[in-house]
Amino acid sequence: MSRSDRTAPAGAARAMPGLGLCLACALALAGSGFGGIARAETGVPGSAQADRLEACVAPTPFMRRRHFELIEHQRDETVRQGIRKTDHSLVGCVDCHVRKDSQGGYVPIDAPGEFCAACHQYVGAVLDCFDCHAALPTED
Ligand code: HEC
Ligand code: HEC
Ligand code: HEC
């Protein structure tokens, strides 16, 4: 593998601004939950921060049945009254529960089979939350 083999694609993208733009689009789509085509990987069991911890932000039986009350109440306060708390933020749920693929990259938390999707597929609930909110951790 020569040095020019590796630099050629970058040079080509710079020479064709249109191509660079499309790559940006593809990355944006991959990050927004339309990644089924671009990203075949799924989360590796045990790769979420939560998998190494004992407890959620509230007792697990409560979280299993009533997690949406926490985040929907939070949403109403934030959006309607401008209050911004951090203890039950959706960003926190994503940061702790998101999994990595075998390459070490994060898999969107609402992708099929991932944490915020698997149970909902089972009960037939459809969420629009990640149309607006990031499904990947924010530190990256
Ligand atoms: C139409 C866009 C939109 C949709 C859909 C949406 N939100 Fe939000 N959400 C916002 C905006 C705007 C804010 C306030 C700005 C902020 O805090 O980032 C917010 C704030 C929040 C917050 C408090 C701040 C944070 O980041 O935690 C939570 C929790 C939240 N939303 C949860 C949800 C949940 C759960 C759903 C799905 C049921 C949802 N949102 C759907 C736009 C949206
Ligand atoms: C700091 C890490 C962390 C954060 C932040 C966090 N969780 Fe958890 N969550 C966990 C852990 C650890 C468990 C498993 C606890 C157990 O095994 O009893 C869990 C369990 C759950 C469960 C039950 C899962 C199951 O299979 O029964 C749900 C639902 C859940 N969390 C939703 C959320 C939501 C929604 C948020 C954001 C409001 C959130 N979590 C924030 C660590 C976290
Ligand atoms: C342990 C299974 C499980 C996990 C994990 C889980 N959910 Fe849920 N979720 C449910 C169930 C069950 C319902 C209730 C569906 C109903 O009653 O209609 C629900 C409902 C919701 C609702 C309300 C939907 C509506 O139409 O009113 C929101 C919002 C929600 N979940 C957000 C999340 C988010 C965000 C995550 C990931 C951080 C998550 N859930 C992870 C099982 C789960």
Image: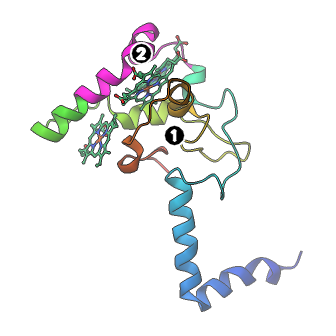
Identify the residue at the far right of this view: 1
Residue shown at the point (66%, 37%) measured from the top left: 43
Query: What is the spatial separation of the Cα atoms under label 2 and label 1, in whole angstroms?
Result: 17 Å
Principal secondary structure, stretch drawn in magenta: helix
Mark identifier at residue 98: none
Query: In the image, is 125 to the left or to the right of 22?
Result: left
Residue 20 against residue 16 in the figure, above or below: above
**Label 1 near ligand 3 (CB < 8 Å):** yes
Neighbourhood count class around disc 1 (C-alpha, 10 Å): few under 14, some 14–19, many 20 upward: many
Residue 22 against residue 107 in the figure, above or below: below
Which amino acid is tagged 2?
Met
**Label 2 near ligand 2 (CB < 8 Å):** yes
Q: Nearer the viewer, residue 84 or 131?
A: 131
Please provide percent x and percent y for residue 94: 46, 36
Residue 91 against residue 139 in the figure, above or below: above
Mark 2 or mark 1: whose residue is earlier in sequence: 2
Q: Quadrant of ligand 3?
A: top left
Residue 66 lies in the magenta stretch: yes
The quarter of the picture where the N terminus appears is: bottom right
For disc 2, the marked residue is 63
Residue shown at the point (45%, 17%) measured from the top left: 56
Question: Magenta region: which residues?
Answer: 53-73
For disc 1, the marked residue is 110
Which amino acid is tagged 1?
Asp
